[in-house]
Image (spheres, rainbow, N blue to C red):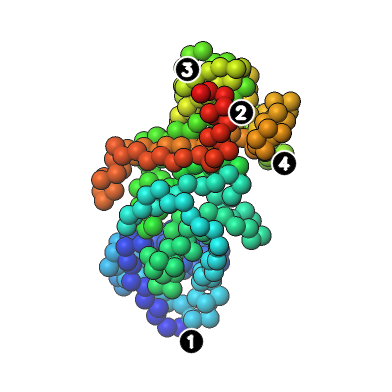
Amino acid sequence: MIKIRELIIDKNEHDQRLDRFLFKYLSRAPRSFIFRMIRKKNIEVNRKRAKPETMIYKGDKVQLFLSDETINKFITIKEEFSSNIELDIIYEDKNVILINKPAGLLSHKAGQDFEENLVDSMVTYLIKEKKYNPETEKTFTPAICNRLDRNTSGVIIGAKNYQALKIINEAIKNLEIKRYYKTIVNGIINKDFKAEAYLSKDKDRNIVKIKEESQKNNKKIQTNISVLDKRKGYSLLEIELITGRTHQIRGHLASLGYPIIGDRKYGNRKINSIFKDRYQLDNQWLHGYRIQFNGLSSPLEYLNGKSFGSRPENKYVEIEKDLFR
């Protein structure tokens, strides 16, 4: 039997297209089905005919003229979140949470296999602290706005509501949010410079290739490199990530002849073995140590100009001290 199911839009569904809301709410439905239901007026907004691009706002009512059986077949299945990881929280307010991710932890779930990851840990924490209730949300789950490789540590930005997620993602897309990394490379770099190149990804091998000239299917990358110290055949660098491609910093520095110490994919095996034997370093010495917010619109404008940093793990600090102090 077909009944009207009415969904009242709240702050975490506010200001988005109708079709994008429905893609999340009816996440198991084919997109063609959703478009067809809108076209046939089986889905309306405020009891008026709608289009896929119709914008919906807080307080609007979306009517679904569909059977309970159909809705239940396609509706989003609520995920269960469970993690025993204790978060290293740098900063938190009602909109965002900044977390220092350790090396070795996935930023988010990979495929269907369960493995501890930062997103599940963040959501578990927010549920326990009663700052997020999945049972009252139609589509929104707290999410991260930037990602780090499994073996790269550093600051992760978490969004606690849809508006924060949208605003921060837009600022990152517009290159407004500054992301800074510290790393140690093999070789002496004498001056600061901006490096530009083109990156392509080998998905089968999960590595990237860097070229000086544009080729088919590659993407332009830009990396600002600043020298903090240099001695003993190594350079301590601050990297400003302008574009944010997969393995960009690691691949770009290696292509320039300055591989990151400990990097098993792009590094120097002989150098890596020295640091593994001496410090048990088994991954790249790369830490996203600072983020500066800019270009955020209301209600996140209070974060503009603010910078948040994180301390690398003790092993990294020991290596830096031994090489440069």
> Is there a contact, CB below 8 Å, between mark 3 and mark 2?
no
SS type, badge 1: loop
Which of the two labelled residues, at mark 1 and mark 4, occupies the earlier sequence position? Answer: 1
Query: Mark number for residue 204?
Result: 4
Q: Position of residue 207 (x, y in %)?
A: 67, 35
Give the labeled residue for mark 2. Answer: 260
* Residue type (three-letter) at the residue carrying disc 4: Asp
Residue at image point 46% right, 77% down = 66
Q: Residue at x 55, y 62 (%)?
A: 84
What kind of residue is marked 2? Ile
* Quarter of the figure with residue 13: bottom left
Q: CA distance from mark 1 to mark 4?
A: 49 Å
Q: Which residue bears the numbered disc 1?
A: 1
CA distance separating discs 3 and 2 = 17 Å
Label 4 near label 2: C-beta < 8 Å?
A: no
Kind of element beneath mark 4:
loop
- The amino acid at mark 3 is Phe
Mark toward the viewer: 3 or 2: 2
Label 3, label 4: how many angstroms apart (C-alpha)? Answer: 32 Å
Name the kind of residue labelled 1 in the image.
Answer: Met
- Foreground label between 1 and 3: 3
Q: CA distance from mark 2 to mark 4?
A: 23 Å
Q: Nearer the viewer, mark 2 or mark 4?
A: 2
Q: Position of residue 55 (x, y in %)?
A: 33, 58
